[in-house]
Amino acid sequence: TTFILRIPFTLVTIKVLLVKAGNELFAIPSSNITELLTISYKDVFSVKNKLAVSIRDEIIPYVELYKVLTMSKREITSEKIYILIIKSGNEKLALQVDEIVDEYKIVIKSLDKPLKNIRAISGITILGTGDVLPVLNVVDIIEIAKEIMREKIKKEIITEHKSKILFVEDSLVTRQMGKSILESGGYYVDTAINGKDGWNLINRKRYELIITDIEMPEM
């Protein structure tokens, strides 16, 4: 009796670290992670308009995973944040995640067309729970992070030449309408949803004009 076992070449077993961004779970190949750290928001600083952290006197660019994946930001109350130092070739990146879950050995399956060319995703894996989990492509993550930093610098150069207005309004409709009208007039506009939010922005930025409702939450 002859048994023939066919194993797809598209399946590869690797070690990954499971992390969370927002409420979503992702896998990052452990071979691309050099370090796991818990730091404070105060440890993140700006160098030439780019966010960075200093690890043993080495300046490493910093970015949040939710921004790379264009996800909604998760509300975090703790002053501590989790970062992974990921590496591709000679390039390093401090990648902030919302939660570090655990390290697993998984079987990764590459994506077929038309999903094959999705940026930042190198494949998928299926957990024991039956959940399908995206495996992130570190090369793409670092490249997207550089694009985000370049775009941030470009926006800051543009906004330097615009008058800055802070529009404080608790009504979503009024806030969006006011922001749209002011931006159409060539102004740079930040919005705040209440007095406390507005006060925090005033302490971080300088504005030529502040427009605010008199009665609103947390005035």
Image: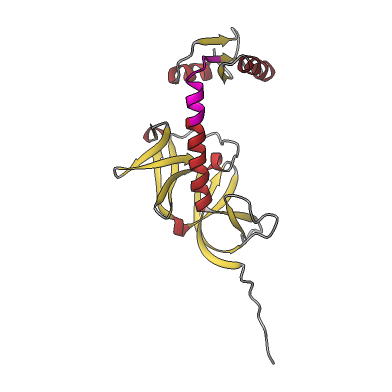
Residue visible at 62% across and 67% down in the picture: 10
Vertical placement of 74 versus 182: above or below? below
Residue 198 located within the stretch drawn in magenta: no
Q: Is residue 218 left or right of residue 94?
A: right
Q: Is residue 47 left or right of residue 97?
A: left
Residue 218 visible from this viewpoint: no
Name the residue at the top extreme: 214
Percent across and percent down for residue 9 are 61, 71
Vertical placement of 59 versus 14: above or below? above
Place residue 165 in its image quadrant.
Answer: top right
Residue visible at 43% across and 46% down in the picture: 93
Residue 197 visible from this viewpoint: yes
Percent across and percent down for residue 160 are 47, 20
Magenta region, residue range: 154-166
Q: Quadrant of the C terminus?
A: top right
Residue 164 located within the stretch drawn in magenta: yes
Percent across and percent down for residue 100 are 49, 48
